[in-house]
């Protein structure tokens, strides 16, 4: 596998799962030392306690105290197991970041373990979800459904995969934030693992999922490899392989943390854990649990010599190969696959945000009025807006000014992870689509608003890119004194959409830990202020206002556009003494090099009026192609002055895959610039063409539960519009 740099979370569960399976009770001081030492080794996820009756598990009597100590370590994500509502209340009070509720798929095991059937545990789960939603302290707590005996049970024997899928479905319906599939009794095999992950994933989509393997029959690491191949990136493990389940006869031995980390790091995954320190931690178990069997191949055999520079097979670890750009339209799993985005925006700013998230793999559903986004019909400078910023999106056409249209949209947003809008202040509140209304039905929603201004005296003003360029100093800095000039592209709209996407990504990351969404706001004015911050700080440092770019005193003597033979223009810069020397050598200007009054850049800046005419004269008869090759060889910054339409034939863009064919809504295609970054050497390519108006209305509304008859009624009343590919099934007959 090519896994260089991929991160895998290893969740240390020995303090809970391990200690509940041993007869001796480790004192609290021992647990605190364990947590500290594991933290020093780089472990950042630990399941440290369970809130159960001390009569049944005296090993867990100090759960609250242990969590209090764990919370003192910055960046440590703390999980606690709770079998019931009372335990959840205690875990929330103690400050656990995540709570896992054990829901055994095996009825016999569930009754033996928690005295409830699986369905009764789902009811309990509902109550815990309600607790977290109603208690402010639980608002940031991640609720995990821990599906134990998912691969088999020593009491029941075979556990049908259909039962696992049903409990998974019920857990998601009950409001879980994450699923964990547990091989409680060590029955799992690699083939079984792959098939079950696929079955559950097909049912619950991209719900975050972890795996909890036992190594009872020696299959733990093999099962982990298969789970990795199926996209799982979080695994439970226990130091020295401690673990078991008192309610499952024969259950023993979690996957050993040391062995798991060694295998993952050897495969090129990153865990952030120091293996040597992890192995040394076993001495603490020997001290506080004398006589307890400790497991693990690594502790018995030791690390390979020179690890990690040399792998276990004795072959030197090769550096990650330089990625080759992926030119295939279909890539492996994209970062935001499984994330649903509903975008109700127009023009540039909001659509840019949606395009970025769509390129990253999210399902983006664009809401348009029945006539379509007005940007589709723009002429002149706006003619390219829609096709540029609306790839990788579905189109749903709804009249949200009608109650039925608003209702359909509100139902859709209730299923979304992210909602994007860029309408004037107050419009979303009028439609019942403001953050505070939507989060009542969907507390996990991330609401991204793109506005002219953030909260403050200007917040109710309408803004355009040009307006804020004038207000924030960018137009003043771009044109000559007295002639403010806007930049030649929609820089603030595009960057505002980028910052909206950055905010959405940050909120998605935080939601993975907290379980709740956020309101994100991005604004044109504040974006433009950031663009001019360097000029503000120039004044703060020097006490002198920054001059507009055409009037400024350059920091370098050579930093200008020159005319070449045939009338072509080229920008040249010499920002250091070495580049100055190379440029003079290249142009045969030895007298300038010999002039001691031009020895330093500052001297040359003061002599620009003398230097530039000499350079201009030397360049005026120079061929652009010849000059470009010589400048490139001399490592001197240069650029031919190009027009946008010339970029369609740019050799670098063509060779590097910076342009990709995009199919348009009329069936034609055009080369389209891609997002300016790559992931593992692959560019993010168009997966969907520019949609026709309402192309996906039928598919999306039917997916929300609308019947075909209801869909036809919405179309007939003008509430919805269907594109050619969105006809009702009955109409297609």
Image (spheres, rainbow, N blue to C red):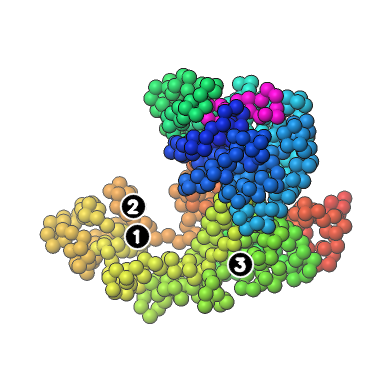
As drawn, the label of residue 570 is 1
x and y percentages locating residue 655 in the rendered image: 47, 45
Q: Is residue 686 visible?
A: no
Which residue is rendered at x = 54% and y = 23% of the image? 292
Res. 212 mark: none
Task: Please give the range of residues in magenta.
Answer: 231-255
Task: Please give the residue where the numbered disc 3 appears in the rendered image.
Answer: 422
Circle 1: element type: strand
Q: Which residue is mark 2?
A: 628
Q: CA distance from mark 2 to mark 1?
A: 9 Å
Please give the name of the residue rendered at 55% of the width and 75% of the height, measured from the top-left corner.
459
Tell me where residue 50 appears, x and y as whole percent: 62, 40
Q: Would you call the spot at circle 3 few (<14 residues within 10 Å), some (14-19), or many (20 or more)?
A: many
Image point 62% across, 70% down: which residue? 423
Q: Earlier in the sequence, mark 2 or mark 1?
A: 1
256 versus 602 height, above or below: above
Which comes before the other along the chain, label 3 or label 2? 3
The percent coordinates of residue 178 (x first, y second) are: 65, 44
The reply to whether the C-beta atoms of the residues labelled 3 and 1 are less than 8 Å apart is: no
State left or right for residue 295 relative to residue 86. Answer: left
Q: Are marks 3 and 2 in contact (CB under 8 Å)?
A: no
- Which quarter of the picture shows residue 589? bottom left
Residue depicted at x 71% and y 59%: 441
Q: Residues within 10 Å of mark 2 (few under 14, many from 20)?
A: some
Can I make out residue 185 in this image? yes
Of the pair 436 and 493, the residue shown nearer to us: 436
Q: Nearer the viewer, residue 612 or 733?
A: 733
The residues tagged by marks 3 and 1 sit, at their Cα atoms, a distance apart of 39 Å
Q: For the residue labelled by badge 3, is the local secondary structure a helix, a strand or a loop?
A: loop
């Amino acid at each position: 596998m090519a896994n260089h740099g991929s991160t895998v979370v290893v969740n240390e569960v020995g303090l809970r799962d391990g200690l509940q399976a041993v007869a001796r009770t480790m004192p609290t001081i021992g647990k605190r030392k364990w947590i500290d030492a594991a933290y020093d080794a780089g472990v950042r996820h630990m399941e440290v306690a369970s809130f159960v009756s001390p009569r049944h598990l005296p090993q867990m009597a100090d759960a609250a105290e242990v969590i209090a100590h764990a919370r003192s370590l910055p960046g440590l994500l703390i999980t606690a197991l709770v079998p019931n509502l009372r335990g959840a209340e205690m875990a929330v009070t103690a400050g656990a970041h995540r709570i896992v509720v054990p829901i055994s798929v095996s009825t016999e095991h569930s009754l033996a373990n928690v005295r409830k059937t699986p369905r009764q545990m789902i009811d309990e789960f509902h109550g815990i979800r309600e607790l977290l939603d109603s208690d402010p302290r639980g608002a940031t707590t991640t609720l995990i459904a821990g599906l134990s005996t998912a691969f088999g049970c020593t009491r029941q024997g075979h556990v049908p995969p259909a039962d696992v899928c049903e409990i998974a479905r019920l857990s998601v319906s009950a409001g879980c934030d994450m699923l964990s599939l547990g091989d409680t009794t060590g029955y799992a095999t690699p083939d079984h693992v792959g098939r079950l992950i696929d079955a559950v994933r097909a049912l619950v989509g991209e719900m975050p999922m972890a795996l909890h393997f036992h190594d009872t029959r020696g299959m733990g690491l093999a099962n982990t490899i298969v789970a990795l191949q199926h996209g799982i990136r979080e695994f439970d493990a226990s130091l020295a392989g401690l673990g078991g389940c008192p309610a499952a006869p024969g259950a023993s031995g979690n996957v050993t943390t040391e062995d798991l980390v060694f295998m993952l790091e050897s495969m090129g995954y990153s865990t952030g854990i120091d293996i040597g320190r992890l192995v040394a931690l076993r001495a603490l178990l020997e001290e506080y649990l004398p006589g307890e069997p400790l497991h693990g191949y690594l502790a018995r055999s030791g690390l390979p010599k020179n690890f990690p520079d040399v792998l276990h097979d004795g072959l030197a670890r090769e550096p990650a190969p330089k990625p080759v750009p992926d030119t295939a339209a279909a890539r492996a799993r994209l970062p935001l696959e499984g994330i649903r985005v509903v975008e109700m925006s127009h023009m540039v700013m909001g659509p840019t945000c949606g395009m970025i998230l769509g390129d990253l793999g999210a399902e983006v559903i664009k809401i348009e009025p029945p006539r379509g986004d007005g940007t589709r019909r723009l002429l002149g400078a706006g003619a390219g807006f829609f096709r540029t910023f609306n790839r990788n999106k579905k189109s749903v056409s709804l009249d949200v000014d009608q109650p039925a249209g608003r209702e359909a949209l509100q139902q859709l947003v209730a299923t979304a992870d992210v909602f994007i809008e860029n309408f004037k202040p107050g419009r979303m509140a009028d439609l019942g689509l403001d953050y505070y209304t939507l989060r009542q039905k969907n507390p996990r929603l991330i609401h991204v608003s793109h506005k002219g201004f953030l909260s403050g005296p200007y917040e109710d003003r309408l803004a355009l890119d040009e307006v804020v360029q004038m207000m924030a100093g960018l137009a003043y800095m771009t044109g000559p004194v007295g002639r403010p000039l806007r930049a030649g592209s929609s820089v603030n709209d595009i960057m505002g959409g980028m910052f909206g996407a950055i905010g959405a990504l940050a909120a998605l990351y935080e939601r993975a830990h907290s379980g709740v969404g956020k309101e994100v706001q991005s604004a044109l004015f504040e974006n433009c202020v950031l663009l001019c911050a360097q000029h503000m700080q120039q004044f703060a440092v020097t006490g002198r206002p920054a001059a507009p770019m055409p009037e400024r005193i350059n920091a370098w003597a050579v930093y200008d556009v020159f005319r070449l033979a045939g009338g072509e223009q080229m920008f040249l810069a010499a920002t250091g003494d070495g580049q100055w020397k190379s440029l003079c050598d290249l142009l045969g200007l030895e007298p300038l090099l010999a002039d001691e009054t031009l020895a330093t850049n500052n001297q040359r800046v003061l002599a620009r009026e003398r230097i530039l005419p000499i350079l201009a004269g030397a360049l005026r008869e120079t061929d652009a192609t010849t000059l470009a090759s010589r400048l490139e060889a001399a490592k001197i910054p240069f650029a031919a002055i190009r027009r946008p339409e010339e970029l369609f034939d740019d050799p670098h863009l063509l060779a590097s895959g910076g342009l990709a064919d995009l199919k348009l809504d009329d069936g034609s295609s055009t080369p389209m610039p891609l997002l300016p970054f790559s992931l593992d050497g692959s560019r993010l390519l168009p997966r969907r063409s520019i949609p026709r108006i309402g192309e996906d209305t039928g598919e999306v509304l039917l997916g929300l539960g609308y019947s075909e008859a209801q869909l036809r009624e919405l179309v007939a009343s003008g509430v919805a519009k269907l594109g050619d590919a969105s006809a009702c099934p009955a109409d297609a007959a």
